[in-house]
Image (tube, grey):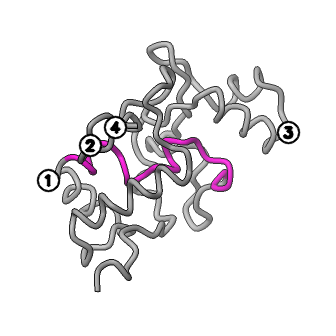
């Protein structure tokens, strides 16, 4: 039965770690990075982040891969990764729109194709709630984490 299956299980493949400028780092994320890397904020910003449209984003390498992702090792900051990374693939578009979910499934081997979209949404909303990843009231959060009026979800 579908409810017994996980809608998503990270395979650490790096598909979601590819693309320049998409990993927004909130003040909370920056604090986690400071503690984990044991570096002052200005050094973290200088070495690992860029400012883009008034927001901090993680730098990418020459192949547009997140600088914290290494092939064969996965995410080097997995335990303290930014909220936007923690939320993947339960982004607003994938929850709202079946076609977006299907496109995400094409690139992400961690999304279970045997689970219906409605179950993906149910598990996703539960996961986001349990992990405090719904950022409706945070002006620094990425829009993909703002979930007003999704399937009746309005918190």
Q: Is residue 143 above or below residue 131?
A: above
Q: Which residue is mark 2?
A: 150
* Separation (CA) of disc 3 from disc 2: 38 Å
Judged by depth in the image, the label closer to the viewer, 4 or 2, is 4
Query: Where is the N terminus found, in terms of image quarters?
Result: bottom left
Q: Which residue is mark 3?
A: 38
Earlier in the chain: of badge 1 and badge 2, it is 1
Judged by depth in the image, the label closer to the viewer, 3 or 1, is 1
Judged by depth in the image, the label closer to the viewer, 3 or 2, is 2
Marks 1,4: beta carbons within 8 A:
no
Crowd around label 1: few <14 · some 14–19 · many ≥20 (10 Å): few
Marks 1,2: beta carbons within 8 A:
no
Q: Which residue is mark 1?
A: 99
Q: Which mark is residue 125?
A: none
Earlier in the chain: of badge 3 and badge 4, it is 3
Most foreground residue, 75 or 30: 30
User: Residue 50 location, x and y as percent?
Assistant: 56, 23
Q: Which mark is residue 154?
A: 4
Crowd around label 3: few <14 · some 14–19 · many ≥20 (10 Å): few
Marks 3,1: beta carbons within 8 A:
no
Main SS class of the magenta portion in the image: helix
Q: Residue at left 49%, top 39%?
A: 62
Q: Which element is circle 1 on? A: helix
Name the outermost residue toward the left: 99
Most foreground residue, 20 or 97: 97
Marks 4,2: beta carbons within 8 A:
no
Q: Residue at left 77%, top 24%?
A: 41
Judged by depth in the image, the label closer to the viewer, 1 or 2, is 2
């Amino acid at each position: 039965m579908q409810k017994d299956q996980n809608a998503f299980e990270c395979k650490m493949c790096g598909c979601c770690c590819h693309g320049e400028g998409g990993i927004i780092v909130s003040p909370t994320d920056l604090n986690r990075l400071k503690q984990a890397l044991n570096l002052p904020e200005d050094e973290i910003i200088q070495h690992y982040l860029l400012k883009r449209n008034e927001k901090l984003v993680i730098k990418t390498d020459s192949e547009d891969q997140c600088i914290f992702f290494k092939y064969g090792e996965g995410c080097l900051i997995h335990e303290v990764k930014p909220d936007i990374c923690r939320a993947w693939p339960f982004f607003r578009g994938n929850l709202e729109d079946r076609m977006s979910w299907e496109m995400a499934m094409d690139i992400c081997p961690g999304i279970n194709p045997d689970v219906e979209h409605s179950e993906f949404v149910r598990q996703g909303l539960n996961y986001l709630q349990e992990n405090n990843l719904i950022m409706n009231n945070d002006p620094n959060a990425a829009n993909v984490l703002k979930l007003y009026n999704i399937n009746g979800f309005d918190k």
